Image (cartoon, rainbow, N blue to C red):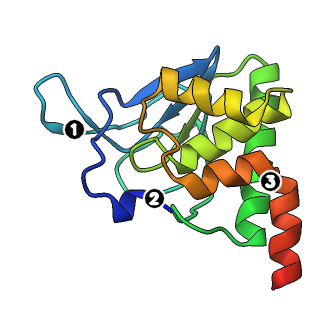
Amino acid sequence: MRTRGMQPDVPAPRNPWSEIVPGLWMGGHEYRGRTGRLETAVVRDEFDVVQSLLRLPGHGPDAGVEHRVWPIPDGPLDGTQLAGVIRLARAANEALDAGRRVLVRCYHGYNRSGLVVAHALVQRGGAPDEAVRLIRARRSAWALHNELFVAYLRAGLHTVRLVEELAE
């Protein structure tokens, strides 16, 4: 399994966030700006809903912006964490259906946010591999480089959750 923590050579993204499908954005807390230096991605009021899978102080969003926080590791997830990912994907889709702009973010905006966004796309009828391809094309080739998360998507998060809960 490859994760951010195990791959220090994973480059920071070039943008704080990227639109994957209309209204659904994926991003992080840090990116490499135009000068080539690392910059902090601070959300103000650009989005109606922000879902944070990692919360760092001072990164927003502004008061009045709906903010859902569900910290998960960039590694194996237990049944409760998987249930949260499924709920966040559903909430993102409900917000999209209501015409709201949604940002799903983690540290770089590659793996954890990719898992939620990809599952949201699957919930909308997409195939897991197509969701991964789209995310990599729109965000970065490094998006969803955590092979475990891609395996979760291919197996189906509901199935993985049931297996995890049976093992507990």
Q: Amino acid at mark 3?
A: Leu
Q: Secondary structure at mark 2?
A: loop
Judging by the rendered image, the residue that carries numbered circle 3 is 157
State which quadrant residue 123 falls in: top right
Q: CA distance from mark 1 to mark 2?
A: 24 Å
Q: Amino acid at mark 1?
A: Glu
Q: Secondary structure at mark 1?
A: strand
Q: Who comes first in sequence, dot 1 or dot 2?
A: 2
Q: Who comes first in sequence, dot 3 or dot 2?
A: 2
Residue in the picture at 89% in, 67% down: 162
Judging by the rendered image, the residue that carries numbered circle 1 is 39
- Residue 168: in sight, yes or no? yes
Q: Is residue 128 left or right of residue 77?
A: right
Q: Who comes first in sequence, dot 1 or dot 3?
A: 1
Q: Residues within 10 Å of mark 3 (few under 14, many from 20)?
A: many
- Residue 69: in sight, yes or no? no
Q: CA distance from mark 1 to mark 3?
A: 33 Å
Judging by the rendered image, the residue that carries numbered circle 2 is 2
Name the residue nearer the viewer: 46 or 20.
20
Q: Amino acid at mark 2?
A: Arg
Give the x, y percent position of residue 114.
58, 41
Are the residues flagged by discs 1 and 3 in contact, CB closer than 8 Å? no
Residue in the picture at 49% in, 57% down: 54
Q: Residues within 10 Å of mark 2 (few under 14, many from 20)?
A: some
